[in-house]
Image: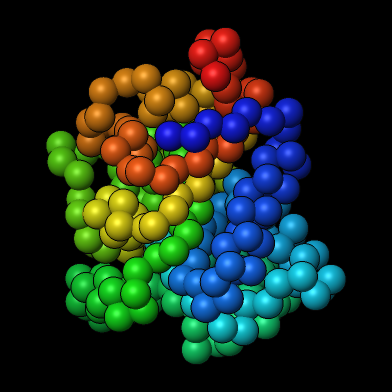
Amino acid sequence: MNLIIVKNYEEMSVKAAHLFVAQLINKPDSVLGLATGSTPVGIYEQLIKFYNEGIISFKSAKAFNLDEYVGIPKDHPQSYWNFMQTIFFSKVDLPDSNQFIPSGMSIDPVLEASNYDKAIEMSGGIDLQVLGIGRNGHIGFNEPNLQFETKTHVVELDEQTILDNSRFFEDVSSVPKTAISMGIKTIMQSKQIILLASGIEKSDAIHKMLHGSITPDLPASVLQLHPNVTAIIDREAASKLDISEY
């Protein structure tokens, strides 16, 4: 795993965006794996800037999001579809037909998950996947478990994840308890992965991800097995690492 330690969130976002720019310049029809939450917002801001400057275009690209809450409509303020439209999709030239996010309102979430994997496969797989990491080591909504979930699936959200995400809702009781998420196998089949972490609250998960055993108790640990992962983390997230090793 290639580890890059930066000063702060802003530098993390810039370095990650540069990898996306290189990907799109080298392969304009790239299949991008995108994430929601506060961590990747800075990347999207940088990519919008590069797009407005004419450096990159998304008109030939496709984008598959990691996950979506089950039970809330697309136009809900906290749906990930709404997040991506507001933060990113509406500000670049990515065609509507090339924007893929699981439907949280599907009458059959299990079938929705299966069809989502088929769509990724039919697109040739994900070229570049961006990931955040939860305090409990989750990636996507793959929570600590007894086994690694493989394909896109319906997941019961961990108590820590619900608590962490409650800041986006009126209160913790308003946070959905289930979601559709890409599975570990789907993520690991990506040709290149960027993992981002910022803040002291991520330091324990980062240390365990890099130095702990590969275990479904810390889903991000499986990234140790991927041949092309770049982890870009700020100094606070790296605070439990022995920097001299890197």
Q: From this view, report whether residue 41 is shown above or below residue 203.
A: below
Percent coordinates x, y for residue 81 in the rendering:
52, 72
Query: Quick check: 35 left or right of 91?
Result: left
**Residue 93, image quadrant:** bottom right
Q: Which residue lies furthest to the right in this view?
A: 53
Q: Can residue 176 be spotted in the picture?
A: no
Residue located 40% across and 51% down the image: 140
Which quadrant, please, contains the N terminus?
top left
Query: Quick check: 236 left or right of 142?
Result: right
Percent coordinates x, y for residue 91 in the rendering:
73, 76
Query: Quick check: 32 left or right of 199?
Result: left
Residue located 37% across and 58% down the image: 190
Q: From this view, report whether residue 231 is shown above or below residue 52.
A: above
In this picture the colour scheme is rainbow
Q: Can residue 51 be spotted in the picture?
A: yes
**Residue 136, image quadrant:** top left
Task: Tally the marks.
Answer: 0
Q: Residue furthest left?
A: 146
Q: Nearer the viewer, residue 227 or 203?
A: 227
Query: Quick check: 91 left or right of 199?
Result: right
Q: From this view, report whether residue 4 is shown above or below residue 62.
A: above
